[in-house]
Amino acid sequence: MAVDLRSYLGHVELPNPVLTASGCGGTGRELAQFFDVTRIGAFVTRSITMVPRAGRPTPRMAETPSGMLSAVGLQGPGVEVFAERELPWLAQRGARTIVSIGGGSVAEYTALARRLAGAPGITAVEVNLSCPNVEDRGRVFARDGSAAAEVVASVRAATNYDVPVIAKLAPDVADVVSLARLCVDGGADALSMINTPLGMSVDVDTMRPSLAAGTGGLSGPAIRPLAVRCVWQVHAALPGVPIVGMGGVMTGRDALELVLAGACAVAVGTALFHDPFACQRILRELEELLQARGFDRLADAVGLAHRPAGAGPRNRIDLEESSL
Amino acid sequence: MAGSPVQVTGTVLTTRRVEAYHALTVVAPAVADRFRPGHFVTVGVGGPHTSMLTRRAFAIHDVKPDYGGTVEFVFSVRGPGTAWLAERRARDTLDLVGPLGRPFPLPRDPCTCVLVGGEYGSASLFVLADVLQRRGCRVDFVLGASSADRVFGALRARRMGETTTLTTEDGSLGMRGEVTDVLAGVIADARADVVYACGPMAMLRGVTAVCAEFGIPAQVSVEQAMACGVGICMTCVVPVIDEDGVTRMVRACTDGPVFLGERVRFDDVGTIPFDALGAPGGRHG
Ligand SMILES: Cc1cc2nc3c(=O)[nH]c(=O)nc-3n(C[C@H](O)[C@H](O)[C@H](O)COP(=O)(O)OP(=O)(O)OC[C@H]3O[C@@H](n4cnc5c(N)ncnc54)[C@H](O)[C@@H]3O)c2cc1C
Ligand SMILES: Cc1cc2nc3c(=O)[nH]c(=O)nc-3n(C[C@H](O)[C@H](O)[C@H](O)COP(=O)(O)O)c2cc1C
Ligand code: FES
């Protein structure tokens, strides 16, 4: 029997739990050459900014063991061009689109949310909190609970009530759980994690940093254990909050690992650079793995790794759930 | 769609050494079918559980109809990915995506073309020469490298070209110097209408400057570090002046790799020019 793969972000239903990760799927058109972007759970856009951004100088990328460092710097055409050219293209095809937004101040995030409010074809808004706060000497919002909560609250207020707001967190913070809690208190309907932790590499031939920007975000399987840890801790503390898990998902097994840790959906980033068909393949593999383990519904696997040690396999869990 | 890329697991048909380079021929009919001169492929390296996540880009050197269609590319060993590729043998399989990129634009009417290649950059020029000659164009070659063993395809150039001029920095083959030292003479003698060039960024910049003196277009194929090759990672950008006169950071993999040389701001590669669209503190619209 087919597994029921539906996933819920707040009250929004996705037909399956596999999404693209922000900044890793282009505009949608590039991937559409390889697969039908309406078949995945949702397409997540790169982080959209108020004005056009040229991004960082090159080299922007350096490969590292089982991962890569990148410093793209949110290159993009700005929200006007996005709303006029990119979003309608996705909407016309019927793709579920989660729009990621990035800003340098609370006011900028709010303005972005306002500009997008009412635009057709938006399934959810994801708030990229790993942006430097220009009003706080460039400290990223994700490292400052009160600033993050303020951004989330203002985006929530400016966004249509029926569009969920997802707060995206980074792992390189003192306490990801308290950050998650502040974002949920600020009005986040769901959380996504993890954004890239900051890393660096030095080219021993040129004896200079490999990236023009010096530091960059680390992504790929190298960060998967960080992602699993963050999802685990936040799910344990806030079991009712939907989590989009991401960080180094290359296969269905990796996706299942995050699901068992507490993610109800999984986003695929760096894997797409290696394999443009990664989303579809991971979805198929995840379904097969769930089937092989006797699950009828994806929802039954979410957070299952949190069951007490020694608790039996699935039937025991079913009992616990039905007694809720 | 002629241009749309595909992913294939191709079987390696042959491997060979060509002077300092390695060449791999892979059975990939769907890539060969869609190929135009100037296209490239990306290759997944390191096998199924690889720790090398970014794909490696290589210009397509040749396509042949054998086994439904084969693709050949030429490479030099630079780091771990190309070292792994150099160990592939016949009957191994390779994960290819292609054909990718904007190919060389072709002249509508017969004309005289100078094809300039630096190091392995000349690998992509012979299929181009073939297409140009079939359209009645005259083709002259200028090939250069640091030393004789790194000049790729000198024999084939001599066979195909109206003239062939070779340069090496150490003087071990042809003239001592760089391709840009001899290019003006070749353009003048052939009365060239257009130059096609593929090679290191510094060479392309020099070629573009020479062409500007003659007022003829240079179609240059640039090389920028790439992670995906299909336009989704935004790591491969170069500053290019658009038709509207505005400089944008454009992707070498999908908007290029072939650009009109005069549009590429070679001096600003590796920076964000202050007047580029969206530059920090700069223009926004
Ligand atoms: C359009 C295009 C066509 C190319 N054609 C050829 C060719 O025909 N023959 C050939 O020998 N080489 C070619 N290259 C360069 C080739 O892609 C690199 O030499 C190769 O990726 C190096 O991989 P590595 O693992 O050996 O080296 P490493 O230095 O370990 O590579 C690490 C990472 O950097 C990237 N990278 C490093 N240098 C380059 C570069 N110059 N260009 C692109 N990515 C780079 C790699 O893709 C990889 O992600 C081409 C590059 C481009 C962009
Ligand atoms: C090249 C690149 C660009 C990215 N751009 C964004 C972005 O614009 N907004 C964002 O929230 N995250 C961005 N990310 C982070 C990813 O969405 C994701 O959180 C992270 O890469 C971990 O997932 P992965 O290991 O599957 O790539 C980017 C990552 C990469 C590698
Ligand atoms: S290599 Fe990824 S966008 Fe060009």
Image: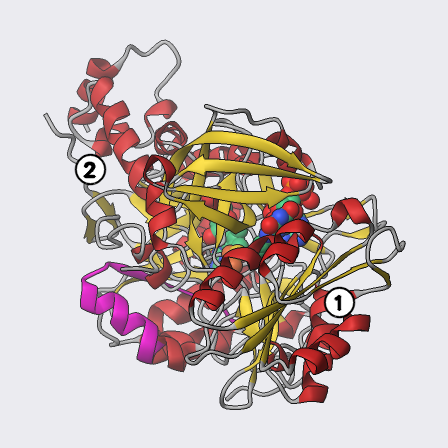
Count numbered badges in the picture: 2
Dividing the picture into quadrants, the one containing residue A119 is: bottom left
Residue found at x 74% / y 57%: A214
| Label 1 neighbour load within 10 Å: few <14, some 14-19, many 20+ | few
Q: Looking at numbered disc 1 in the image, what kind of residue is underneath it?
A: Ala
Q: Tell me: B96 left or right of B201.
A: left
- Identify the coloring: secondary structure
Please tell me whether mark 1 sits on a helix, a strand or a loop.
helix
Q: Is residue A24 left or right of residue A163?
A: right
- The lab-note entry on whether marks 1 and 2 share a chain reads no
Q: Which residue is mark 2?
A: A5
Residue A229: x percent and y percent?
50, 33
* Secondary element at image label 2: loop
Instruction: Please give the residue where the numbered disc 1 appears in the rendered image.
Output: B202
Residue A170, percent from left and from top: 54, 49
Residue beneath the point at 70% across and 54% down: A215
Residue range (magenta): A83-104
Residue A68: name its quadrant: top right
Q: CA distance from mark 1 to mark 2?
A: 53 Å
